[in-house]
Amino acid sequence: MGAEVLQDITFTLEPGSFHFLTGPSGAGKTSLLKLLYLAHRPSRGLVTMFGRDITAAGRATLPPLRRRIGVVFQDYHLLDHLSAIDNVALPLRIAGGASEAQIREHVMELLAWVGLKDRMQARPPTLSGGEKQRVAIARAVIAKPDLLLADEPTGNVDPAMARRLMHLFVELNRLGTTTVVATHDIELVEEVGGAVMSLENGRLHVDEDDRRLPRNPLTESGRDGWEDV
Amino acid sequence: MPIRLRPLRFLPESGIAGGTLPWVIGVMVYLSVLAAGFGFALHHGVAGWADDLSRRLSIQIVGADADDAEKQAAAVVAALEKTPAIGSVRRLSEQEMARLLEPWLGVGNVTADLPLPILLEVALEPGRPLDVPALAARVSRIAPAAVIDDHQRWLVEIRRLASSLELTAIVIVGLVLAATAAIAAFGTRAGLASHRDSVEILHLMGAEDGVIAGEFRYRFMIQGLKGGLGGLLLGLATLFSIDHLAEQLGRGLVPALELGWVDWTMIAGLPLFAAALTMLAAHFTVRRELARLP
């Protein structure tokens, strides 16, 4: 077993809360997110999600929980041989229940919204970094997850698109999705507001005003990013 | 676990098993078709031969005195003709006896002064049991010089040889199919290794192990079927070619390819069996690998 990356961390994400997760590189942001999207199990301690003790839960109980979590991975994790539309459709296809026509309609609408109307059939290797990031974000939010975890989701897009994507996160949060956005972008944090959790040397400091709500960067910051997209 | 009629299709259309899997499975099915074909043909050939032989008896009357031998032979024929389980009794002519001896003595070397026994060929009535020891006892009372041969010694040897060859064929088919499963498992592991990222993403998105394994099962089943059908066609072509050549050469030791519908069904089912085996090997390999993920 390797060295412990996170130590003595205690926090609760209230349903519908919005948190930024900040901290220098190597502070453990990605490790914390991995614990939250159930890619890792804690070596000790207790993680409870959706009313379940994840530490002791059997493997078979985790997939339904994972389907309630949307993740924007730092390195996108797109499937290179699938088109943008098929990448975004994956969570809906995994969940089942929706017809293929419904899935396509829903996916196309969302891809158009993130500015990829003309890139729907493109495969990830032909997409730019920013386009990949938008596909990854669309995939994370398509199934309206209960928990949205985003690891540096605006790292490869211009400020206008960053605001537009944050708008998407904030709107989703207002619909009840608990959201955690890991970022280095302090300007974005200040612009959007919301509670901040900061990690340093594997230890977590939680904002005193843990219930602070985020502002919509498109409609409430005084700047309008729509025209920039 | 939900049953999916439409696979997720998260793997690329081609190259999942390196492209060589259908070829290898084709070769495996080809070998098993040959082994099964020869095994079944041998089984039927020996069974037919043994059945024919078991419905015949030979009675040899060896006497120093030719007249006495003739009398004993006539008495035996008369007694046998009255026995219900005996279908017919035929005395071999001197020409037939000479032909039987030709392989040992050479053509034209069977002269009139060579003392030959009297040979009776007895055909049994089909479906009517015969107490051979009782018949032998009766015949020896009538004709002390008579020696009865029910071919049991040969039959036992032939059946033993045939059983060994059949068992060998079964072992070959079993080994070939086991190798097919092993190859499929290696292929799956290679496929998993080259698509580990895709599998992990699916896993993190909440795809059940069965759904992920289902994609591999589907792909490997298709690969197995493709290769298997190729192997079957090639195997059948080889079997019929050998049978045709053997027919032209007068058969000899090669049994005829006269198989029953059960045998043909089993041979035709080999590609399906190989595909199912490939599919199962892929399934269990993927499930085992997935079990290592959290």
Image (spheres, coloured by chain):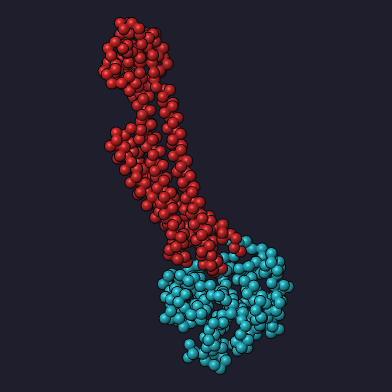
- Residue A220 position within the rendered picture, expressed as x and y whole percent measured from the top left: 56, 91
**Residue depicted at 48% across the width and 80% down the height:** A128
**Residue depicted at 39% across the width and 55% down the height:** B226
Decide: is B27 above or below A211.
above
**Residue depicted at 66% across the width and 65% down the height:** A55
Q: Is residue A10 left or right of residue B252?
A: right
**Residue A221 visible from this viewpoint:** yes
Q: Quadrant of the C terminus of chain B?
A: bottom right
- Residue A196 position within the rendered picture, expressed as x and y whole percent measured from the top left: 66, 83
What shade does chain B have?
A: red
Question: Hey, which residue is sitting farthest bottom in the picture?
Answer: A222
- Residue B68 position within the rendered picture, expressed as x and y whole percent measured from the top left: 32, 5
- Residue A175 position within the rendered picture, expressed as x and y whole percent measured from the top left: 56, 80
What shade does chain A have?
A: cyan
Q: Could you say which is closer to the camera, residue A10 or residue B215?
A: B215
Decide: is A210 above or below B118.
below
| Quarter residue B52 falls in | top left
Q: Could you say which is closer to the camera, residue A223 or residue B111?
A: B111
**Residue depicted at 45% across the width and 52% down the height:** B276
**Residue B74 visible from this viewpoint:** no
